[in-house]
């Protein structure tokens, strides 16, 4: 097994060059299978939309360890611009585990858009996915999400979802 270490010294004002270089190296290492799960696990520290290109490929990898590393990466990728790629992973995956990890990361983004998405999941899903959305909403710390919760609480016809929304409102 080839072990690879990348250390890039970047001058002030040239940070993007170093970041792009790191992504290119990880993409090459993953593509050529030189280092097992390492490149995929490293993505959890690289807050770029481009990280999701490898993550999405890794989620469909035949190697179970690579798929698990992709879940670890999803768990660490929670930055504002990650919302759309995470929502896409949630929508496209049939694996409840992948969908749950995506919801956890979406909840850490702390934006109104993320809150709206989690409320939609809470209202439309059931079982573990509804619970994952509830937990993620309970951990959100964005006052702008409260009016969304109130609005959906008032119009919700499903008693179980209405109770969950009420519980979330009382916690805030």
Image: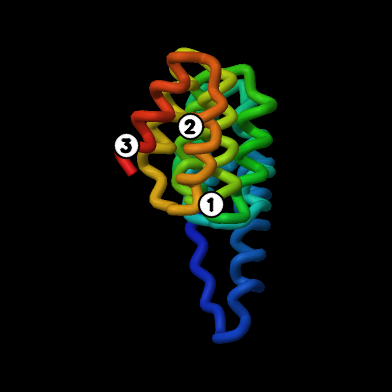
In the rendered structure, which disc, 2 or 1, sits on the residue that comes first in sequence?
2
Q: Quadrant of the C terminus?
A: top left
The reply to whether callout 2 and callout 1 are in contact (CB within 8 Å) is: no
Looking at the image, which residue sits at the far front? 154
In the rendered structure, which disc, 2 or 3, sits on the residue that comes first in sequence?
2
- From the image, tell me which residue sits under label 2: 101
Label 3, residues with CA under 10 Å away: few <14, some 14-19, many ≥20: few
Measuring from the top left, give residue 135's x and y in whole percent: 38, 32
Q: Is residue 60 left or right of 96 when viewed as pictured?
A: right
Measuring from the top left, give residue 65's x and y in whole percent: 48, 27
Label 2, residues with CA under 10 Å away: few <14, some 14-19, many ≥20: many
Label tally: 3
The quarter of the displayed image where residue 85 is located = top right
Badge nearest the viewer, 2 or 1? 1
Question: With respect to residue 87, does 99 lie above or below?
Answer: above
Mark 3 to mark 1: distance in Å?
A: 20 Å
Looking at the image, which residue sits at the far bottom? 12
In the rendered structure, which disc, 3 or 1, sits on the residue that comes first in sequence?
1
Report helix, strand or loop for mark 2. helix
Nearest the eye: 13 or 87: 87
Badge nearest the viewer, 3 or 1? 3
Mark 2 to mark 1: distance in Å?
A: 17 Å
Report helix, strand or loop for mark 3. helix
Nearest the eye: 24 or 161: 161
Q: Residue at x 45, y 46 (%)?
A: 108
- From the image, tell me which residue sits under label 1: 111
Mark 2 to mark 3: distance in Å?
A: 26 Å
Q: Residue at x 55, y 86 (%)?
A: 12
- From the image, tell me which residue sits under label 3: 170
Is residue 2 at least partly visible in the picture? no
The reply to whether callout 3 and callout 1 are in contact (CB within 8 Å) is: no
Question: With respect to residue 124, does 148 lie above or below?
Answer: below
């Amino acid at each position: 097994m080839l072990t690879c270490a990348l250390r890039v010294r970047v001058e002030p004002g040239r940070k993007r060059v170093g970041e792009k270089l790191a992504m290119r190296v990880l993409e090459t290492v993953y593509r050529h299978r030189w280092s097992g799960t390492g490149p995929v696990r490293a993505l959890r520290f690289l807050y770029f939309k481009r990280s999701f290109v490898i993550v999405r490929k890794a989620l469909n990898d035949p190697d179970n360890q690579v798929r698990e590393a992709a879940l670890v990466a999803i768990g660490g990728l929670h930055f504002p611009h990650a919302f759309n790629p995470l929502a896409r992973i949630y929508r496209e995956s049939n694996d409840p585990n992948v969908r749950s990890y995506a919801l956890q990361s979406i909840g850490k983004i702390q934006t109104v858009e993320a809150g709206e998405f989690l409320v939609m999941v809470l209202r439309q899903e059931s079982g573990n996915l509804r619970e994952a959305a509830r937990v993620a909403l309970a951990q959100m710390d964005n006052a702008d999400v409260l009016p969304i919760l109130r609005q959906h609480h008032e119009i919700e016809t499903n008693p179980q979802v209405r109770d969950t929304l009420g519980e979330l409102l009382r916690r805030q």
